[in-house]
Structure formats: structure tokens, C-alpha cells
């Protein structure tokens, strides 16, 4: 395995995705970058590192969270501050945020889109929708946390749990303020993206299931 470190520049990735989309607008993002990503992952050893991170026993799976479809800003009247919401972009990936109430969200994104220079901030719901109408809210009421592993060595904040909507929002706001839990605010497409942030706010676990699905597909 190579010892070379790799820095994924979100701005460069965003430009590459946009350029590819302009040429092949109906092609899923996984097919667009699959061959190139597979080559990079295999030659650098990054795939093994990321796969180990995603499958780590210190980050249990959350099974049973249900995506409930919503449409339009008017649907915000049915949301609770602290709900985790997501939206599937035309390029095939999903963007996530914490609903902050009053038709505002807290998300890991750039000022004018998902990519560019992402940072965690509060923004209008319209920024999250970005011209789209259909989105979803994750219902964790029937979710199951896998606690079959040894939690003795984990810090209290990393123990598996599902936080209330109020606590979820408080955690999200803490990152934009004093960041008392020390969440990493440096964006990384693979290890610290918008989904990692949203899931961490709800569960304390830094996980991205779409990254896991993507890597599982190209590493097979």
C-alpha cells in the first residue's frame, strides 16, 4: 500500500463533475467517474484506507432510517427543527442538511452550490433546494443502532445513539459557533462531507452511506 497522502480538492471535483455533466447530462455520476476513481483508488491504496474507515466497528450501521418524500418549501411546515433532510441532485448524488426551522437549514456547502469552497453554515431553504422541489426527510423513529461491538474504548460522544431533534439542531449550531464537540470543519468529499456532518448531528457517528455504496460498487 502506498504511503502517499491524497488531498481531495472539493473545488476541483466540483468543476470536473460539472464539465462531465455538460457533456453527458443523463449519465449517473458513478458511471462518469467510476473507471478513473477505480484506478486512483487501486494505485494509491486510498480505497483500502477509506473502506477500512467506512467499515470500522467504531462506527456502527444505522438500519431502518426511512426517507420520507417531501416537495416544495411549503413542506417545511411539516418538518421539525433538527430533522435531517436530503435531496438527490440531477448528477446522481445526495446532498444533506439539518433543518433549522423558519425555512432555513444548516449544511456543509459552498455559498453558490454544493461544491466550490464548502463550509458549515446556516442558509435559506432555497439554497438547499437550489432550484429543485422534491427532497426527503429521514425518519429515525424505527432506526436500529448496531451495538454488537465493544463500546468500552469509545468516548461518550461517540457512543451509538439517536439524538432528539432539539439536540440534533443544538449539535449543528455548535459547529457554527464554539464547536464544543470538535467536529472537523475541513471539507473532504470522501471522509468529511455534507452527509457525514448531518449524520453526526443526529447520531454522533461520522458516516456517509452514499460514499460506502459508491466505493462498494467500484471496488468489487
Image: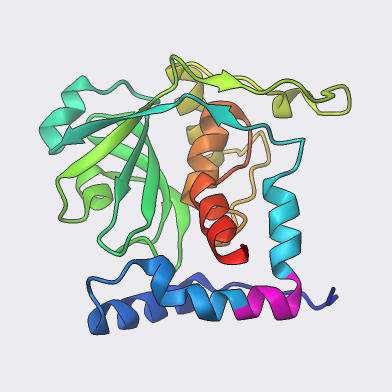
Q: Is residue 160 left or right of residue 87?
A: right
Q: Please name whichever residue, 87 or 130, is drawn nearer the observer in this view of the structure.
A: 87
Q: Please name whichever residue, 82 or 85, is drawn nearer the observer in this view of the structure.
A: 85
The residue at 57%/36% (across/down) is: 200
The residue at 39%/41% (across/down) is: 97
Q: Quadrant of residue 155?
A: top right
Q: Please name whichever residue, 66 or 85, is drawn nearer the observer in this view of the structure.
A: 66
The residue at 56%/66% (across/down) is: 218
Q: Which residues are magenta?
A: 39-45
Q: Is residue 162 visible?
A: no
Q: Main secondary structure of the magenta part?
A: helix
What is the x, y in percent for residue 220? 61, 62
The residue at 23%/74% (across/down) is: 25
Q: Is residue 71 visible?
A: yes
In the rendered image, the vertical position of residue 88 relative to residue 29, given as above or below: above
What is the x, y in percent for residue 127? 25, 52
Residue 66 among those drawn in magenta: no
Amino acid at each position: 500500500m502506498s504511503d502517499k497522502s491524497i488531498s481531495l480538492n472539493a473545488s476541483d471535483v466540483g468543476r470536473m463533475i460539472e464539465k462531465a455533466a455538460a457533456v453527458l447530462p443523463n449519465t449517473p455520476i458513478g458511471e462518469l467517474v467510476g473507471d478513473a476513481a477505480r484506478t486512483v483508488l487501486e494505485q494509491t491504496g486510498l480505497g483500502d484506507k477509506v473502506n477500512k474507515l467506512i467499515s470500522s466497528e467504531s462506527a456502527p450501521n444505522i438500519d431502518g432510517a426511512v426517507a420520507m418524500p417531501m416537495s416544495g418549501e411549503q413542506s417545511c411546515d411539516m418538518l421539525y427543527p433538527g430533522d435531517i433532510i436530503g435531496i438527490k441532485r440531477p448528477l446522481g448524488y445526495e446532498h444533506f442538511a439539518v433543518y433549522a426551522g423558519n425555512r432555513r437549514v444548516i449544511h456543509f456547502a459552498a455559498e453558490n452550490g454544493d461544491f466550490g469552497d464548502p463550509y458549515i453554515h446556516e442558509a435559506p431553504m432555497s439554497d438547499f433546494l437550489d432550484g429543485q422541489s422534491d427532497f426527503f426527510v429521514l425518519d429515525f423513529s424505527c432506526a436500529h443502532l448496531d451495538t454488537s461491538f465493544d463500546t468500552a474504548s469509545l468516548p461518550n460522544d461517540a457512543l451509538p445513539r439517536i439524538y432528539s431533534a432539539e439536540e440534533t439542531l443544538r449539535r449543528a449550531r455548535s459547529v457554527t459557533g464554539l464547536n464544543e464537540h470538535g467536529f472537523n470543519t475541513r471539507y473532504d468529499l470522501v471522509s468529511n462531507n455534507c452527509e457525514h456532518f448531518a449524520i453526526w448531528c443526529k447520531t454522533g457517528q461520522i458516516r456517509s452511506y452514499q460514499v460506502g455504496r459508491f466505493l462498494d460498487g467500484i471496488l468489487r
